[in-house]
Structure formats: C-alpha cells, structure tokens
Image (spheres, rainbow, N blue to C red):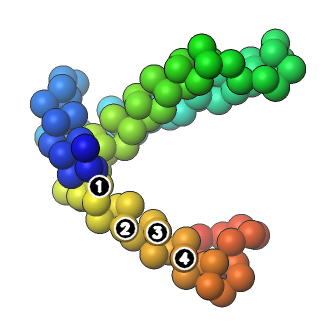
Amino acid sequence: MNFEEYQKKSRLTAKYPDAGKNYIYPTLGLAGESGEVAEKIKKVIRDKGGVITDETKEEIKKELGDVLWYVAQIATELGLSLDEVVEKNIEKLYSRMERGKLGGDGDNR
C-alpha cells in the first residue's frame, strides 16, 4: 500500500467531531499517540535494560500506526497529500545531506 491509498482508506475511519473541517482534533491525537510511542521506549530503558523484544516491537508498531493515522488525518484536513508531504520531506533531507547540514538545529539549515 502506498501513502495515497493509506490516506484514502484511513479517511473512511475518521469519526471525530467536525471531520472535514477540524484539524485540531487529529493534532491533539497525534500528540497523544506520539507520547505513547515515547512511553513504550521509556519503559524499555527503565524495565528491560534497553532490550526491545519482539512483543515490544509489535506494541510499538501498533502505536506507530496510530501516529501515522493522525498524520494522515491532519494532512487531509489541510488538503495535503501524504505523497507530497513525504516527497517534500525527502527533498529537504537530501538537500541538508548534500550541504552537510543534517546535524544541528533550525528548520532552515
């Protein structure tokens, strides 16, 4: 499945207040789900000595899927194509790589 297909299929499951004109709800959901990914990793460090088991990978995979779902909904709410989003991101990263600017901080490096 490609990003365009995922975006279209995931949209059929977008059942939240004012879907189609509400970018705030999925943005808050993204923050929550990314926090859940961070929690899983934190607990691996705290409880498992940094060792990620197959079971933990599956749990993280599910949470990353939730993160992707919210990213897709935000993009849709803003009229953006996920294909365009990922393409633009790769262009930005490769430009930074070519200029030796992958490290550091700031959006415009």
Q: Are marks 3 and 2 in contact (CB under 8 Å)?
A: yes
Residue closest to the eye, 102 or 74: 102
Q: Residue at x 37, y 43 (%)?
A: 71
- Eyeballing the image, is 54 above or below 81? above
Task: Reply above or below: 91 against 55.
Answer: below
Which residue lies under the disc numbered 4?
94
The quadrant of the rendering that contains the N terminus is top left
Q: Nearer the viewer, mark 1 or mark 4?
A: 4
Q: In percent of the image, x 76 and y 70: which residue is there?
A: 104
Q: CA distance from mark 4 to mark 3?
A: 6 Å
Q: Is residue 48 visible?
A: yes
The local secondary structure at tag 1 comes to helix
Q: Is residue 2 left or right of residue 29?
A: left
In primary-sequence order, the first of circles 2 and 1 is 1
Determine the residue positioned at 15% across, 42% down: 8
Q: Disc 3 designates what residue?
A: 90
Q: Amino acid at mark 1?
A: Leu
